[in-house]
Amino acid sequence: MTKDEQFAELMKRPDIEQIEADYLKLLEDIRTELVARTGIAQWVPKDEPITGSGCGDFPGIGGNVRRYSSGHSPGNLPDAKWQDAVELVESIAGRQGFKLHGAVVDRPDDHEVTLGNDYGAELLFGTAANTTLSISTGCHLTRAAKQRGTPA
């Protein structure tokens, strides 16, 4: 794919600032519902919850990938509540186009699932010593790059 074709593909996607707002709200909604419905502890935020980099799959275009960590909920989500919690996360994340891809880890007291969407984003939800939740975006242009209308 040429640079212009790659840029055109990224122009079809929301800009990274919109995705950030959407995904931060999504994480907030999931955390709130997990605490309310499963009884897990309130989330402890991470000191640096947002990191980012350029896009490996669209190099030199001016796109960004961001990673959002929800920190952790202290303690393990009991096995008896795990499937219900996964279904809750899947339902809420589905509003942003995420679909369950499957288990990364699935053993007693240690579980992790991954969900993804059409933009290449990945949501990870897991429990072991603590319960964790994070999203890595796919590649998105900045608002400035979209306004510029041409590759960097």
Image: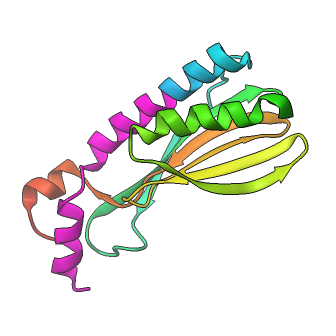
Magenta highlight on residue 10: yes
- In the image, is 7 to the left or to the right of 95? left
Q: Where is residue 46 in the image (x, y as percent from the top left)?
A: 62, 32
Q: Where is residue 49 in the image (x, y as percent from the top left)?
A: 54, 37
Does residue 78 appear in the picture of this structure?
Answer: no
At a point 84% along the width and 44% down the height, the residue shown is 110
State the residue in front, 83 or 36: 83
Magenta highlight on residue 60: no
At a point 16% along the width and 51% down the height, the residue shown is 144
What quarter of the picture does the C terminus occupy? Answer: bottom left
At a point 39% along the width and 47% down the height, the residue shown is 97
- 52 up-or-down from 61: above or below: above
Does residue 119 appear in the picture of this structure?
Answer: yes
- In the image, is 101 to the left or to the right of 103? left
- In the image, is 81 to the left or to the right of 63? right
Q: Where is residue 70 in the image (x, y as percent from the top left)?
A: 59, 33
At a point 54% along the width and 28% down the height, the residue shown is 30
Q: Position of residue 91 (x, y in %)?
A: 51, 35
Magenta span main SS: helix
Range drawn in magenta: 1-28
Total label count? 0
Furthest-bottom residue in view?
2
Q: Quadrant of residue 9?
A: bottom left
Furthest-right residue in view?
108
What quarter of the picture does the N terminus occupy? Answer: bottom left
State the residue in front, 146 or 125: 125
Rendered image coloring scheme: rainbow
